[in-house]
Image (tube, rainbow, N blue to C red):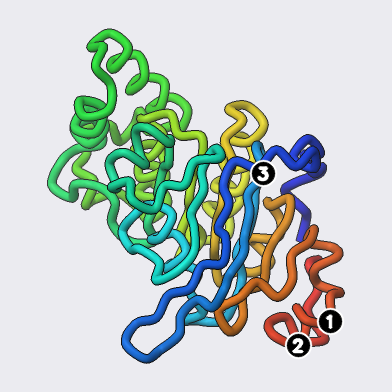
Amino acid sequence: MSNIKKFRIKYFKKENTILKLEKISLKFGKKIILDNLNLKLNNGQILGLLGPNGVGKSTIFNLITGLLSPDYGSIIIDSKTVNKYPIYQRTLKFKIGFVPQHGGYFHDLTVLENLKAISEITINNPNFRIEKINSLISKFELDPVVNIKANYLSGGQKKKLVIALALVSEPKILLLDEPFAALDIMTIKTLQQIIVNLQSTSRISVILCDHQARDLLECVDTAAIISNGRVIAQDTPSNLINNTNAKNAYFGESFKIN
């Protein structure tokens, strides 16, 4: 399998951190989900999260967006602790965009109506609003389905729409929860290229999680393995698959990228 990312962006190695989770702990009842977890995203970086089912990857996204609050620890964006900021302020003030695994759009509205609905909330200038909508329709090649209700789109078209909706507010950080789930090979390749292009052309920092480990590793700069509520290994894809902790907790001995 060819590697979609022929190069790794280097400037994130300057340690210009845009998002940091410090000593995050969270329990649901008596079940420990996250246990003193530390994680950081550097400016312009694409970071992948990997781990077994139920390890807390989607929970991390919910903490960053404000859907959940940690029992302990700090969520820091651009050097500001945001634990007490509500969801809408994290979207508008701290520029967080979120693409959920399921849904994320208005089923009974057309593609155009979906984009208009979100842009009316996030963009005050009507002229810029129209310009932004047209730009996103073009970027994601949604012109042929612009007047079709979202519920009737293909899986790949729905995913493109949800990413476009997340980009309406021009986020600095984009969270992608299982973007490759239930998609065909060609659609996955298209989405991988979209993710890489968001980094290279828009300087958006991205965190994505997925169970399709090879697909994820093909388009990230670094990836982190989460096990028992903590990050146990984080490195570039080629280094990570040879990491002993990563092998023992997730990859096994026979996993290879290509």
Instruction: Classify the position of the C terminus by image quarter.
Output: bottom right
**In this view, 95 is above or below 120:** below
Mark carried by residue 244? 1
Q: Amino acid at mark 2?
A: Asn
Q: Residue furthest top?
A: 127
Q: Is residue 158 left or right of residue 173?
A: left
Task: Tell me the mark number nearer the camera, choosing from 3 and 2.
Answer: 3
Q: Mark 2 = which residue?
A: 248
Q: Nearest the camera: 187 or 193?
A: 193
Q: Residue at x 65, y 42 (%)?
A: 17
Q: Quadrant of residue 242?
A: bottom right
CA neighbours of label 2 inside 10 A, class few (<14), some (14 to 19), many (20+): few
Residue 141 sits above or below residue 35 on the image: above
Marks 2 and 1, how far apart at CA? 6 Å
| Earlier residue among tags 3 and 1 | 3
Spatial CA distance of label 3 from label 1 is: 25 Å
